[in-house]
Amino acid sequence: MLSYFQAIVIGLVQGVTELFPISSLGHSVLIPAWLGWDHLVTAQSASESFYLAFVVALHVATAIALFVYFRQDWYRIIGGFFRTLRTRRLETPDERMAWLLIIATIPAGLTGLVFEHALRTLFAKPLSAAIFLTVNGVILLFGERVRRRAMVRNLIAEHPTARSEGEEGRRLDTLSFKEAGAVGVAQIGALFAGVSRSGITMVAGLVRGLDHEDAARFSFLLATPIIFAAGLLKIPDLTGHLGNGIRGQVAVGSICAGLAAYASVRFLMRFFETQTLMPFAIYCLAFGTISIIRFA
């Protein structure tokens, strides 16, 4: 069914790839396929799947790790949200951020409820995941190219700016609600195995003038509630027959995923102070292309 060794490997992979812009869903298909764990590959696209229930539990662990890392931000954002309910005004960056996140969450949340199951059963296969992983690499390259264009520089010049160690960008709280909605729409692409949630939302932020650090911050904050909510909807599956024989593996895999996710977000927030998406674009293009050749 699912060994403890497999649970550890997939848990570690999930914790890293959910935050690195290289698609956790794509890797949850491709890594078992490369390792010859064919029963896990088949289970990923089944209509009822113990493996999907396992992966969803890993997502919850990842969301918890994100919340722990950004807990100070979340305390301020949640407090800001409740203040806006009382005052009916947006007066601070934290209050504005709360509503930016709410608006950006709606498109992917609603689309996921309606289409997630159909898209997973149709596209969560090695060849499809490899193709979309390659597409993800192209998206990351596109984001880096557009970020350097004059129109983005002009957009930055029109707004109050914040400078990270490596570059200048508009302040995160200057995003309009329309722009937040556009970032949320971009997140829908992550429903396809191989397209990275963090990658595509970072690109959406970069083309609106955010620097890499703030684009990553907004991406991770946005991912936390939607990953957690999606996980909670599926967690009850583990209490039924789909959880039989794998609950211990779920616990071990979730611990591994949570620890890997915390280490990953800590690394990435420092990485994006000075670096770009280019290394991840190259990785996706290389691994995606090799996987297409392997599974075609």
Image: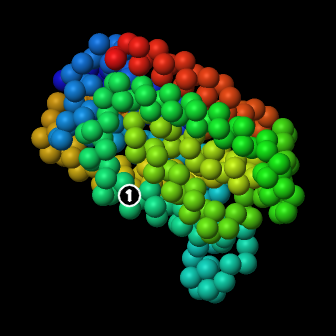
Q: Position of residue 183 (x, y in %)?
A: 58, 56
**In which quadrant of the rendered image does the C terminus lie?**
top left
**Total count of labels:** 1
Q: Position of residue 121 (x, y in %)?
A: 25, 39
Q: Residue shown at 66%/72% (left/top)?
A: 95
Residue lying farthest bottom? 87
Q: Secondary structure at mark 1?
A: helix
Residue lying farthest left? 241
Compared with 21, 226 (above or below) is: below
**In which quadrant of the rendered image does the N terminus lie?**
top left
Residue for badge 1: 111
Q: Residue shown at 36%/30% (left/top)?
A: 128
| Left or right, residue 256 beside residue 151 | left
Q: Quadrant of residue 130?
A: top left
Compared with 86, 222 (above or below) is: above
Q: Position of residue 147 (x, y in %)?
A: 75, 44
Q: Quadrant of residue 47?
A: top left
Colouring rule applied to residues = rainbow
Q: Nearer the viewer, residue 257 or 22?
A: 22
Q: Residue shown at 32%/34% (left/top)?
A: 124
